Image (cartoon, rainbow, N blue to C red):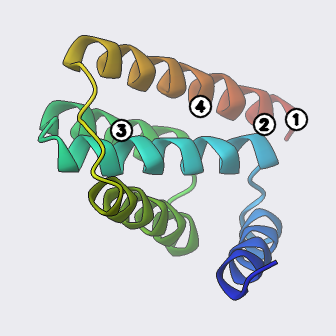
Amino acid sequence: MNKITSSLFLTLILISNAYAVSEDQLESIRQLGDLNGVALKCHYLKEARKIKLSLAASLPKERGLGEMFEDETNRSFLDFINNNKICPGEAGFHNRVQQEIERLKKRSTSVETLK
């Protein structure tokens, strides 16, 4: 495991323990951060806004979770640039964002019912 991966793993463990966030919710944060990086690079600003609003509505308002999302967004954005990726079609990208937002909502609801 490289240094970044191991520190990210440790961060995930600390975040999930500190904020009672499920592993599924952390996966949604990673996925939405990845999509947000693409949205910002491709100027799909409505999608970027939807992503942030869905996270704010579904997760505890904790700095560590926000930092994790921003880190994943930055990683995705830079990966997109460094690998000369082409922006996905807007309709298909919209569908991917919607699917992941729905997944986050379901994951958040299941955690709420366990409390």
**Foreground tag (2 vs 4):** 4
| Dot 4 amino acid type | Leu
Q: CA distance from mark 3 to mark 1?
A: 25 Å
Q: What residue is disc 2 on?
A: 111
Q: What residue is disc 1 on?
A: 114
Indicate the quadrant where residue 31 lies: top right
x, y percent for residue 80 = 33, 53
First of labels 2, 3 by sequence position? 3
Q: CA distance from mark 4 to mark 1?
A: 16 Å
Task: Estimate how packed mark 3 is, as few (under 14), some (14 to 19) or many (20 or more) residues with alpha carbons within 10 Å.
Answer: many
Q: Secondary structure at mark 2?
A: helix
First of labels 4, 1 by sequence position? 4
Q: Are marks 2 and 1 in contact (CB under 8 Å)?
A: yes
Q: What residue is disc 4 on?
A: 104
- Residue drawn at the location 65% of the way across and 82% of the way down: 4
Residue furthest out toward the bottom: 3
| Dot 1 amino acid type | Leu
Q: Secondary structure at mark 4?
A: helix
First of labels 2, 4 by sequence position? 4
First of labels 4, 3 by sequence position? 3
Q: What residue is disc 3 on?
A: 51
- Residue drawn at the location 32% of the way across and 63% of the way down: 82
Q: CA distance from mark 2 to mark 1?
A: 5 Å
Quadrant into which the N terminus falls: bottom right
Task: Estimate how packed mark 4 is, as few (under 14), some (14 to 19) or many (20 or more) residues with alpha carbons within 10 Å.
Answer: many
Task: Estimate how packed mark 2 is, as few (under 14), some (14 to 19) or many (20 or more) residues with alpha carbons within 10 Å.
Answer: some
x, y percent for residue 43 = 11, 41
x, y percent for residue 38 = 31, 44
Q: Is residue 99 placed above or below 113 in the rendered structure? A: above
